[in-house]
Image: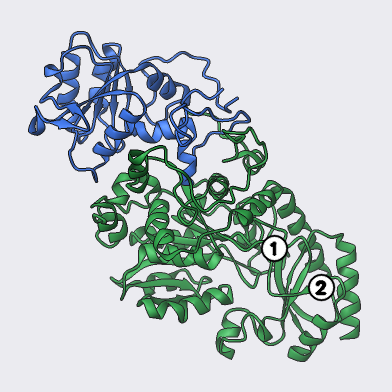
Chain colours: A green, B blue
Amino acid sequence: MTDRLPGFNTLAIHAGAAPDAATGARATPIYQTTSFVFDDVDHAASLFGLQAFGNIYSRIGNPTCSVLEERVAALEGGTAALAVASGHAAEFLTFHTLLQPGDEFIAAKKLYGGSINQFNHAYKNFGWNVVWADSDDPSSFEAAITPKTKAIFVESIANPGGVIVDLQAISAIAKKHRIPLIVDNTMASPYLIKPFEHGADIVVHSATKFLGGHGNSVGGVIVDGGSFNFAGDDRYPMLSKPRPEYSGMVLGETFGNFGFAIACRVLGLRDLGPALSPFNAFLILNGIETLPLRMQRHSDNALAVAEHLASHSKISWVSYPGLRSDRYHNLAKQYCPKGAGAVFTFGLKGGYEAGVKLVSNLKLFSHLANIGDTRSLVIHPASTTHRQLSDEQKTQAGAGPEVVRLSIGLEDKEDLIDDLNQALDAA
Amino acid sequence: MLIELPCPIPYVPVMSHDNYPNEYIRGILNSVKTIALVGASQNPARPSWIVTKYLLERGYDVIPINPGLAGSELLGKKVYASLADVPGPIDMVEVFRNSEAAGPITDEALALDPLPKVLWMQLSVRNDEAAAKAEAKGLKVVMDRCPKIEFGRLSGEISWQGVNSRMLSSKKPVLSGKGFQKLSLNRP
């Protein structure tokens, strides 16, 4: 006997967002304040000691940001979430909560280039060691597991597009070895794929992309699936050991199945500081209200454009799992039957030079380094997002010299196809 | 209106203990006043201390039970060694011990006169045999739940921590009247 769960469209609009208790404001107010007054000294002590629910200081929590947190937790089907300054900050705080110096984590080779840089370089200073595996071969994850492995990281739909990851196969390996599975669900959004339904334990987002959806705000979200039992697990001392920061409290025990999200907040966000601005949270929340409508249009437009490009004489290949001929089409039917997302890549017969020319000839597509905007976007990864990688890494990441990435927007698909046609003709 | 599944069948003792309707939990938290908390701790880092403090702040009369601390004061309340030592009626017994210990604690609770109205076992504590005994005597039973989390969820306070309260409402939350960061259980 359980209370009925509302549908996805309803959650996208209502989850976390009741009218304001003090004023009745119906849209979520932008609580543009650094701090919140305490009722009295005892109330302050309770808040600082994590003994009461409430707001202290906007680096740790803010009522506009917490609406975003609950909204995304509800859409993903998680127990709790934490909003942070960017998708990179979401990854950083996630790993900070799970890893100690000298620990390892396994990551899929096909990832957003920024994540590859973060894992390969920035994390070295913390002694967190990435081990790469091939998401097309789930057994490569199992082969990479050592006693130091503390987490597995994949993207549900992998950037720069066209790759659907077999989450159930990888989560089976993660569960067998009792390792939490982190899924970056930025490219799919919970409208297309809900990783917790396929065995993920933690979901991270760059909310900058499809959640916000309008190309106006950078932000990130960590979602706790509540499925991994960190309490009593010595491998995760941030959650299982008495914390000196909080008078010996054991966070995984005290906060149960949302302990991971709380630990990311009170150990990570509090002490490392990548807080989300309430204004950005407000804009991202507004975007999420139309997430189901937008993701469907993004995917429908992307399929139409991909089908057109697949038959174009100047194009050697199109990598979009929505295409029947695509190697990931069966996985797409299994994991994202409503659509395969907005982002995909294709190869130009003319190689690197043709890629550079195409980008400069386009009139409607904007040449920039983002995805998940209402506007259609184009980039040549080899000369931009992935340029810091070696040639071998570029190819492994699906960003070879001839590759062009599109993020299809919400315009009329006929206009997008016309623009690509004229640019290809001139290239 | 809170969006909740209407519960056409009144609560009967054979209910599932895997899920509880929000109305069932709200009804309990709204009706009990005196809560005997078995397994109270003096250590502010322990969940039992935190829950004791939170429930006291929300106006419940929490009576800490711990034989090792009997006679001392905890958060301004006198600690008793056992449920039988508590003078006066107890509305709810909250078991802050492990699932096995919940058995004999339930037996002690069922020996009280008058009987408590509610037997509540803390998050991670579940003893179906003890629950069945208590239900047979007409008590309402909750297992594997935390009253602080449930209060925070039903009032909306827990949403400030980014927790998925699984509650939707187009009515504004009600301030409890004791400061801005405390909300009432009774949302319209």
Q: Which chain carries label 2?
A: A
Residue B31 position, x and y percent, is 38, 16
Residue A282 appears in the rendering: yes
Residue B181 located left or right of residue A253 = right
Instruction: Please name the residue that numbered disc 2 is placed on.
Output: A309
Q: Count how many numbered circles sit on residues in the image.
A: 2
Q: Residue at x 14, y 25 (%)?
A: B104
Which sits in the foreground, B88 or A191? B88
Residue A302 located left or right of residue A422 = left
Q: Is mark 2 on a helix, strand or loop?
A: helix
A313 relative to B24, above or below: below
Q: Residue at x 52, y 79 (%)?
A: A117
Q: What element carries label 1?
A: loop
Instruction: Please name the residue that numbered disc 1 is placed on.
Output: A372
Estimate how packed mark 1 is, as few (under 14), some (14 to 19) or many (20 or more) residues with alpha carbons within 10 Å: many
Image quarter hosting the C terminus of chain A: bottom right
Residue B80 position, x and y percent, is 13, 24
- Amino acid type at image mark 2: Leu
Estimate how packed mark 2 is, as few (under 14), some (14 to 19) or many (20 or more) residues with alpha carbons within 10 Å: many
Which sits in the foreground, A12 or B43? B43
Residue A25 position, x and y percent, is 66, 36
Task: Report the residue that reaches farthest toward the top.
Answer: B114
Residue A334 appears in the rendering: no
CA distance for labels 1 and 2: 20 Å
Query: Do tag 1 and tag 2 residues touch (Cβ < 8 Å)?
Result: no
Q: Which chain carries label 1?
A: A
